[in-house]
Image (spheres, rainbow, N blue to C red):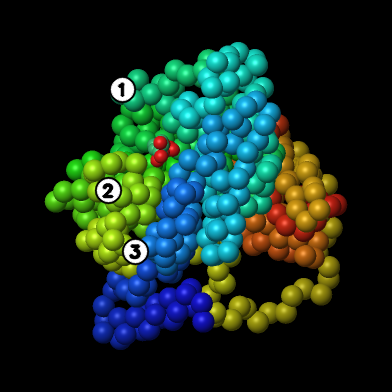
């Protein structure tokens, strides 16, 4: 029996007894009983990950905890630019491949970190500028994302591109000086190289609503409105001795833009509040249905880049800390991810009137005041990415739906700039909140990606 089934049963039982007792029931009151971080997170539809330093994979205590508690891993350093392209055009994947093999052998998904960053660049890139650097950086994204294609759950495509402080502006860097569009260029290159990976922007000091997180929020909103392929935002969450009271509200405002959010590098200064802060972050993630997972930046205190801060969930001996228990409890107490619209409808039987025997009239040719859709496919053996263009008719739209009937064996695995209902057969895509309203003749684009073949699909657009 899988965890979801167990959970659903538990919910049903709790609901029945709560109703019998005349109480109101909320999902949050449903306890579950995971006894490891990964099991408890998985019961709630999330992952729980750790950053892994390659050389530690031969340390038994370390690997025992890693495999028992974590179902996601990220390379602490091995997939960074200096590690993967030490000389221009010479790519080294030894460390990254070793981590991917470890993950595949142990049922862990892999976060990719990080394609572009102003730090940990190889010397040759640090000395470059202008169009030479622009093409070198796009080549780097393309080569690395292609090498790991199909093996990465989420890529940090761009790391730490915003300045600290009150400006809300981009950070100055050699990458930034190649032109403000370097970030979107990187996302387009990453999508083309690995259409199956979720593409994230990742940063720190974004643990609440502040000038820096708002600068990033505005960029993500702009990207989403223009169809730049961004799927997620990572909140590093290297924390001190307090947690911003609007930590959850900040995650939620990003989620409301239609991206997933992830806690990507969590560690917390030790001291009286450590367990509470870890629990607060975990609760915030659980309360945001698009918060899909949490990663701590290391396993044990002595593995942490934060030296003597004792910032993680395990002691060096491998013992669990109080912070571990508080995280586990918060995972177990949290709500599961909100079911997607593919959940079956009510079980009450529908009306018994037989369907009309006369065939419905053939669909009229797209009138002036509906909408039309066209699809362009990028296919390879076993998969495809579809870009769909939606054009409003002469009356404009308040919202739109596009239906696509996939051939047998094909299935949608990821969607951007629209919400999918169903994944096989006839799949219905609905606008998200920022791209439903179109003026007469206005065009918007959304996309989806899938396995199998989508050759020959014809989209049908309905306006509302
Ligand atoms: C750190 C690593 O943990 C260290 O081993 C390395 O020396 C420097 O980088 N933000 C990030 C991470 O995105 O890549 C950084 O990792 C920590 C801060």
Whether label 3 touches label 1, CB < 8 Å: no
Residue 401 position, x and y percent, is: 65, 50
Residue 276 visible to an observer of this rendering: yes
SS category of the residue bearing label 1: loop
Residue occupied by mark 3: 331
Residue at coordinates 24% horizontally, 44% vertically from top-left? 309
Ligand 1 falls in quadrant: top left
| Closer to us: 348 or 111 | 111
Q: Residue at x 56, y 72 (%)?
A: 345
| Residue 259 visible at all | no
Question: Tag 3 or tag 2, which sits nearer the N-term?
Answer: 2
Q: Provide residue 236's location: percent of width, then percent of height.
A: 38, 41
Question: Which residue is denoted by mark 1 in the rendering?
Answer: 166
Viewer-side residue, 319 vs 138 = 319
Earlier sequence position, callout 2 versus callout 1: 1
Residue 418: % across, % down: 60, 47
| SS category of the residue bearing label 3 | helix
Neighbor class of circle 3 (other Cα within 10 Å; few <14, some 14-19, many 20+) is: many
Instruction: Name the residue beneath numbered marker 2.
Output: 311
């Amino acid at each position: 029996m899988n965890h979801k089934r167990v959970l659903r049963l538990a919910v049903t039982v709790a609901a029945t007894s709560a109703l019998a007792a005349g109480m109101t029931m909320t999902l949050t009151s449903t306890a579950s009983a995971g006894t490891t971080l990964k099991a408890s997170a998985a019961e709630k539809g999330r992952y729980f990950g750790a950053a892994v330093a390659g050389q530690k994979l031969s340390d038994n205590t370390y690997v025992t905890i890693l495999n028992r508690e974590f179902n996601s891993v990220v390379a602490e350093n091995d997939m960074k630019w200096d590690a993967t392209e030490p000389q221009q055009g010479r790519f080294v994947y030894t460390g990254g491949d070793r981590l991917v093999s470890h993950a595949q052998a142990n049922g862990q998904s892999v976060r990719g970190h990080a394609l572009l960053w102003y730090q940990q660049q190889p010397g040759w890139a640090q000395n470059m500028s202008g169009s030479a650097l622009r093409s070198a950086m796009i080549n780097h994204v393309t080569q690395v994302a292609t090498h790991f294609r199909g093996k990465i759950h989420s890529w940090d495509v761009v790391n730490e591109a915003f300045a600290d402080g009150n400006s809300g502006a981009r950070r100055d860097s050699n990458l930034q000086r190649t032109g403000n569009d370097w970030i979107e260029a990187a996302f387009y290159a990453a999508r083309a190289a690995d259409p199956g990976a979720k593409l994230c922007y990742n940063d720190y000091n974004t643990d609440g609503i502040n000038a820096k997180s708002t600068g990033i929020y505005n960029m993500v909103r702009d990207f989403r409105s223009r169809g730049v392929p961004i799927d997620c935002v990572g909140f590093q969450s290297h924390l001190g001795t307090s947690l911003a009271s609007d930590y959850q509200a900040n995650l939620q405002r990003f989620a409301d833009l239609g991206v997933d959010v992830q806690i990507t590098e969590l560690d917390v200064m030790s001291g009286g509040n450590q367990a509470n802060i870890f629990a607060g972050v975990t609760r915030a993630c659980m309360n945001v249905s698009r918060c899909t997972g949490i990663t701590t930046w290391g396993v044990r205190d002595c593995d942490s880049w934060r030296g003597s801060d004792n910032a993680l969930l395990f002691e060096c001996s491998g013992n669990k800390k109080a912070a571990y228990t508080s995280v586990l409890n918060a995972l177990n107490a949290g709500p599961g991810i909100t079911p997607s619209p593919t959940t079956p409808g009510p079980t009450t039987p529908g009306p018994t009137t037989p369907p009309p025997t006369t065939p419905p009239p053939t669909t009229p040719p797209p009138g002036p005041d509906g909408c039309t859709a066209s699809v362009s496919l990028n296919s390879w053996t076993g998969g495809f990415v579809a870009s769909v263009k939606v054009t409003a008719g002469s009356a404009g739209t308040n919202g739109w739906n596009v239906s696509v009937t996939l051939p047998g064996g094909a299935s949608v695995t990821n969607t951007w700039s629209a919400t999918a209902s169903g994944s096989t057969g006839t799949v219905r895509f609905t606008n998200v909140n920022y791209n439903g309203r179109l003026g007469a003749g206005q065009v918007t684009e959304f996309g989806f990606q899938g396995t199998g073949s989508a050759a020959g699909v014809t989209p049908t657009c309905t306006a509302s």
